[in-house]
Amino acid sequence: MQYTLKKSLGQHFLKDENISRKIVDELQQTIISSQINNVVEVGPGAGAITKYILQLNGIDFKAVELDDEKVNYLEHTFPVIKGKIIHKSFLDVDIPYTEPFLVIGNFPYNISTQIVFKVLEWKDLVPVMIGMFQKEVAQRIASKPGNKVYGIMSVLTQAFYDVEYLFDVYPACFNPPPKVMSGVIKIKRRNEKMKMKSERSFFVLVKAAFNQRRKTLRNATRSLFSDDVLKEEIFNKRAEQLSIDDFAALTFKMT
């Protein structure tokens, strides 16, 4: 059974078996160490990763796939997957489990950042996510203060998760080859919750600071603090110079 590639859905299908196995090996180690058996794959496509996930023992597996043709292909090629596919965009899916679950995927590049934000909404039930992104997006998520790619996504992800950059994936590993390098990262929920006034305050502050990242924090976040607080030394810095702890601490001073 054949399938077509749809650029509109950001489809670049992994064809390198070694990379597929490496990603699923990382998942298997996570299942063993966390003792969590619920697994959600985002965008299985033609099943490059899926076929190895389906070989894992004792897991409860669900795959989220929007493309009708790929759903039919997966059900035809891997009959055991019938009844396990959620036929929607991941961005429109309700939380798939009421107990902790792991997220994995070769994420569609055109919605990969939105996938991360969706996982952040579910963070209380998602202790680990293993995903393939465009390399620059993967680097942005893993980036540290002072780096030019350190931004909203770096801070919001790392406030709740530790990020590990696992390995590069070359364009030749895909069909069709993307024009960019890819990278696989693993995010693991932090053991201790960061102290902040509220998650909403934290999100508002971080977004305000980075939306005008060339300005000092004082100018970028003026509407969020009193004049007295804005006199503090830290407001002479730009957003990219602040650590995640700095942002969290500042939420307690917001008006």
Image (tube, rainbow, N blue to C red):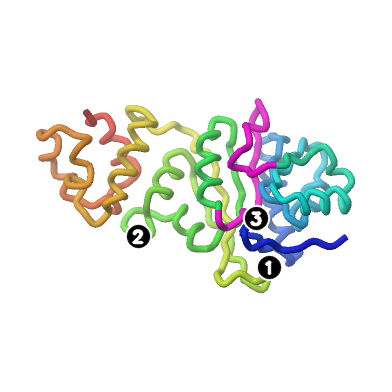
Element carrying mark 3? strand
Q: Quadrant of residue 31?
A: top right
Query: Closest to the observer: 181 or 110?
Result: 110
Amino acid type at mark 3: Asn
Q: Quadrant of residue 127?
A: top right
Residue 44's place in the image compared with 193, above or below, is below
Q: CA distance from mark 2 to mark 1?
A: 29 Å
Say which residue appears at 23% left-offset and 31% top-offset. 254
Please report whichever mark, 3 or 2, sits nearer to the chain's N-terminal start: 3
In the rendered structure, the answer to whether residue 232 lies left or right of residue 202 reads left
Tag 2 residue = 147
- Check the picture and name the quadrant holding the C terminus: top left
Query: Closest to the observer: 66 or 146?
Result: 66
Q: Position of residue 240 (x, y in %)?
A: 30, 53
Tag 1 residue = 174
Is residue 90 rendered magenta in the image? yes
Span colored in magenta:
88-110
Label number found at residue 106: 3
Please report whichever mark, 2 or 1, sits nearer to the chain's N-terminal start: 2
Do the numbered discs 1 and 3 sit on residues whose CB atoms are within 8 Å?
no
Q: Position of residue 51 (x, y in %)?
A: 81, 53
Q: Nearer the viewer, mark 3 or mark 2?
A: 3
